[in-house]
Amino acid sequence: MKPFIYNSLPGRVVFGTGTLKTLAAELEELNCRRAFVLCGAQQASKGAALLAQLGPLAAGLFSEASMHTPVEITDRAMLRVRETKSDCLVALGGGSTIGLGKALALRTDLPQIAVPTTYAGSEATPILGQTELGRKTIQRTLKVLPEVIIYDVALTLTLPPKQAVASGMNAIAHAIEALYTNDINPMIEAIAQLGIAALARALPSIVQNPRNEAARADALYGAWTCGVCLATGRMALHHQLCHILGGSFRLPHAETHAVMLAHAVAYNAQAAPDAMVQIARALGVDNAAQGLYDLAQNIGAPMTLAEIGMREGDLSRAAELAVATPYWNPRPIDKAGALALLSDAYYGRRPATPIGD
Ligand code: NAD
């Protein structure tokens, strides 16, 4: 076995169906009495119901969480946190809501309980992405890592299949990029393959029957394990391009991941052969990039950047941004390579079989 370094992160995970009912007990455990509940506009009624469930333990509700954590929304939420003298943050929703909770925790040091309702995995990471003046910036700090995660499978049953598949591909991307970083360790290698396999198994069943509780549990477990990979591993070209496309071109987060993943993996295939074997094994296929493409297509995920709002004329600018601030990547990034990858994703071309395969 090669030498390795593994950093484990603190955090408590409560997983099951109906686990939201443990929220009051979890607040008590944290010694909190004034919970500030966060959610997005579409989940405002669920936020209000949670406020009612908490009764005297609830201090306020803010239902304006928005994708890519715009700083101006955090500013508004911050005023309400102060006014209500809240002593903790409860984020109920997808990565957007959890991102807002993290941004508030960064400013206040308040403890957080995350209640994820998508598969984005943000709840498991010490990473915060924020958007200001059209640019997304990413930081890692333990200050934003939620103290408690409550995974309640019942809350995910309403996530429409279209969003579930995109979100699931977003989760798989975390595990995949962790597998081809240069600081991989055996723990993350094992967890990443568990996560990829769980989601690849669960997503087709969710598409067939969105209320399949066993598949929803599998997917949520996959979301957590893939989130753990994102938390400790270094992310590479795929995440970089998705951050650029989301932050500077306002493409939807999970859908962008779903479109880009097979192409980023194809770009890195020859530079990261061991990771390709592990990804393919977890997916139960021969070729990692093609297997991801086929999975996305079979579950009805978006397949082209064109259909999720990218303009062809902006591809060159996106490639320039990728080259201007490159992330570490198994295969070096140059403008021509980034542009070719983005163009394949724009048109949704199936990755070619490498010569010699
Ligand atoms: P999201 O949170 O914006 O949710 C997408 C949509 O799904 C919203 O309209 C929401 O109301 C709806 N929704 C969520 N759960 C639902 C449910 N159970 N039933 C019905 N509708 C539901 O999208 P997302 O993809 O989960 O998160 C994207 C954001 O998360 C981005 O800002 C991204 O940058 C961030 N993110 C951060 C990390 C990190 O580690 N920092 C990781 C992944 C994603």
Image (cartoon, rainbow, N blue to C red):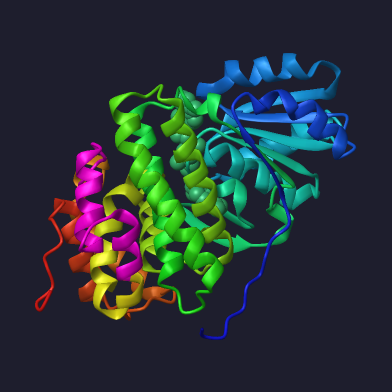
Residue 165 to residue 224: above or below: above
Residue 200 to residue 184: above or below: above
**Along the viewing direction, whichever of 211 and 331 lies nearer the viewer:** 211
Residue 65 to residue 332: above or below: above
Q: Residue at x 37, y 24 (%)?
A: 210
- Counting from the top left corner in percent of width and height, residue 143 is at 74, 56
Q: Is residue 349 left or right of residue 318?
A: left
Magenta segment boundaries in residue numbering: 276-304
- Counting from the top left corner in percent of width and height, residue 56 is at 86, 18
Q: Is residue 311 left or right of residue 193?
A: left
**Along the viewing direction, whichever of 64 and 99 lies nearer the viewer:** 99
Looking at the rendering, which quadrant does residue 356 occupy? bottom left
**Along the viewing direction, whichever of 7 and 338 lies nearer the viewer:** 7
- Counting from the top left corner in percent of width and height, residue 14 is at 68, 38
Q: Is residue 209 visible?
A: yes
Q: Is residue 39 left or right of residue 217?
A: right
Q: Residue at x 23, y 57 (%)?
A: 285
